[in-house]
Image (cartoon, helix red, strand yellow):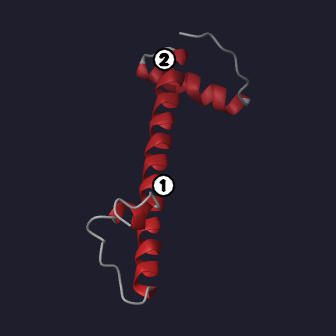
Amino acid sequence: MTRTQLYLPDNQYQELKHLAATRKQTFAQLAREFLGEKLRESKKRKSVKKKRNAASLLLESLKEIENLKGGITDGSINHDHYIYGTPKVRP
């Protein structure tokens, strides 16, 4: 564990001290708990954002595919190429 120091507005400090006392926790335990929750929320939001970006990319690729004349005849083989832009397996 790493020791650190931070500055809090007086009102936040007082509220956290009071909450820690009512929960029968130390101030440090409460601070670690709150920071851990916030970090987990942040990670969840990032993963949702990444999924949304992948979905957007897929939709954009599908729109491009629809605009091609004659359509795609090798989509089952080269789907990674059309979705992610990787080299075609069989040109």
**Of marks 1 and 2, which one's residue comes earlier in the chain?**
2
Task: Give the percent coordinates (x, y) of residue 9.
Answer: 73, 31
**In the shown orientation, is residue 47 left or right of residue 35?**
left
Label annotation for residue 6: none
Identify the residue under disc 2. 29
Residue at the spot 30% in from the left edge and 78% down from the top edge: 73
Around disc 2, counting alpha carbons within 10 Å, would you say few (fewer than 14), some (14 to 19), or many (20 or more)? Answer: few
Residue furthest out toward the bottom: 69
Quadrant hosting residue 69: bottom left
Quarter the C terminus occupies: bottom left
Q: Is 90 on the left-hand or right-hand side of 38?
A: left
Tag 1 and tag 2, C-beta contact below 8 Å: no
Q: As drawn, is 82 to the left or to the right of 27?
A: left
Q: Residues within 10 Å of mark 1 (few under 14, many from 20)?
A: few
- Reply above or below: 23 against 76: above
Give residue 6's position: percent from left, percent from top: 70, 21
Amino acid of disc 2 = Gln
SS state under label 2: helix
The quadrant holding residue 25 is top left
Asked if 25 appears above or below 77 in the picture, the reply is above
On screen, residue 1 above or below 63: above
Give me the residue at 45% from left, 87% from top: 67
- Along the viewing direction, whichever of 67 and 87 lies nearer the viewer: 87
Residue drawn at x 33%, y 65% is: 79
Rendered view: 10 above or below 51: above
Viewer-proximal residue, 22 or 60?
60
Q: Which residue is mark 1?
A: 49
x%, y% of residue 28? 54, 16
Query: The disc labelled 1 sits on which kind of residue?
Result: Lys
